């Protein structure tokens, strides 16, 4: 393993693919290790992305599992890209962060979201998401739904996902999908804001300029030492992961400043209730 290895989101996606191959066939780590010729401990580190996955090892696993050629070749291409990226080479990435983001949310232990014009994806109701994507890009709907489902699946875990969200008051006043849909969304936001692992804060419209204005981002934290924080940025063109620790630290500082400028949880809840009552 490279010294002080830190897995990229792409390497985590590779590990997730390997784990899915094994799960789909109902095999244990020990059973696969015996068949492929290396230890169950090594396979575990590959699946959990705490070491890089070598191309030959992926090919061996694809053979043992009987994975269709196009499927294992895709993962091999990702591993080859990850290896070149680690060596400092830069070429076109065979990986779509926008499609992967929901999976990464499921693996995270903390999520800090700053949005500028929408309710954070983790808290969106299906009708709200549909109204957003219908006029923008319907293909985004599946990705947004996956993010919502990831949080929903984790909120009652023994190790639940902690969510902190900050957004401007304008998000509450933008009537997405019509009054009925928006009111249901605001009532849902009130409900989830009372969950013990959730913090929702609203920047009031009288606050003036605030940090990261016009630049939404989501910052994810993970339990493994080998997995650095990852910032996720998205436009209507593409999604992008930012992994450089210096840049993710900047996101962290801005998020802390946003929370300081925003109303407290109680006052924010009152503002959400006020907006819902007006619909």
Image (cartoon, rainbow, N blue to C red):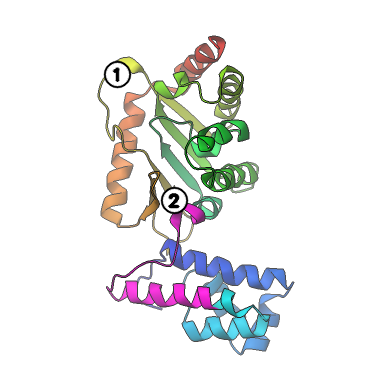
> How far is the residue under mark 2 from the one under mark 1?
29 Å
**Quarter that holds the C terminus:** top right
> What residue appears at the point 73 percent right and 73 percent down from the top-left corner?
25
Picture coordinates of residue 29 (x, y %)?
66, 76
Q: Which residue is mark 1?
A: 207
> What residue appears at the point 64 percent right and 78 percent down from the top-left corner?
67
Q: Quadrant of residue 64?
A: bottom right
Q: Nearer the viewer, residue 118 or 198?
A: 118
Q: Nearer the viewer, residue 38 or 68?
A: 68
Residue at the far bottom in the pictured view: 37
Specify start and end residues of the magenta stretch as a single range.
73-100
Picture coordinates of residue 96 (x, y %)?
45, 59
> What residue appears at the point 41 percent right and 64 percent down from the top-left corner?
8
Q: Which residue is mark 2?
A: 221
Picture coordinates of residue 256 (x, y %)?
33, 35
- Count neighbours of disc 2 (C-alpha within 10 A) and say few if under 14, some if 14 to 19, many if 20 or more: many
Q: Nearer the viewer, residue 167 or 198?
A: 167
Residue at the far top in the pictured view: 278
């Amino acid at each position: 393993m490279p010294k002080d290895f830190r897995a990229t989101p792409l390497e985590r996606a590779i590990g997730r693919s390997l784990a899915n191959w094994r799960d789909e066939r109902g095999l244990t780590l020990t059973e696969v290790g015996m068949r492929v010729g290396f230890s169950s401990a090594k396979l575990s580190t590959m699946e959990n992305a705490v070491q890089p996955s070598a191309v030959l090892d992926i090919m061996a696993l694809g053979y043992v599992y009987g994975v269709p050629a196009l499927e294992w070749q895709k993962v091999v291409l990702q591993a080859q890209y990850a290896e070149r990226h680690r060596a400092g080479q830069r070429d076109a990435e065979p990986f779509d962060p926008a499609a992967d983001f929901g999976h990464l949310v499921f693996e995270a232990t903390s999520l800090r979201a700053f949005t500028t014009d929408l309710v954070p994806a983790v808290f969106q109701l299906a009708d709200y998401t549909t109204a957003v994507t219908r006029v923008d890009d319907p293909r985004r709907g599946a990705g947004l739904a996956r993010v919502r489902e990831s949080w929903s699946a984790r909120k009652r875990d023994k190790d639940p996902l902690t969510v902190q969200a900050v957004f401007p008051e304008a998000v509450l006043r933008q009537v997405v999908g019509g009054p009925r849909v928006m009111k249901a969304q605001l009532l849902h936001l009130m409900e989830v804001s009372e969950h013990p692992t959730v913090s929702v804060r609203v920047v009031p419209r009288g606050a003036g300029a605030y940090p990261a204005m016009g630049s939404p981002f989501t910052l994810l934290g993970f339990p493994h030492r080998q997995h650095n924080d990852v910032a996720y940025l998205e436009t209507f063109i593409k999604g992008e992961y930012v992994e450089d620790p210096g840049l993710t630290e900047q996101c962290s500082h801005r998020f802390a400043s946003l929370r300081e400028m925003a109303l407290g949880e109680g006052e924010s809840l009152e503002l959400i209730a006020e907006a819902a009552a007006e619909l």
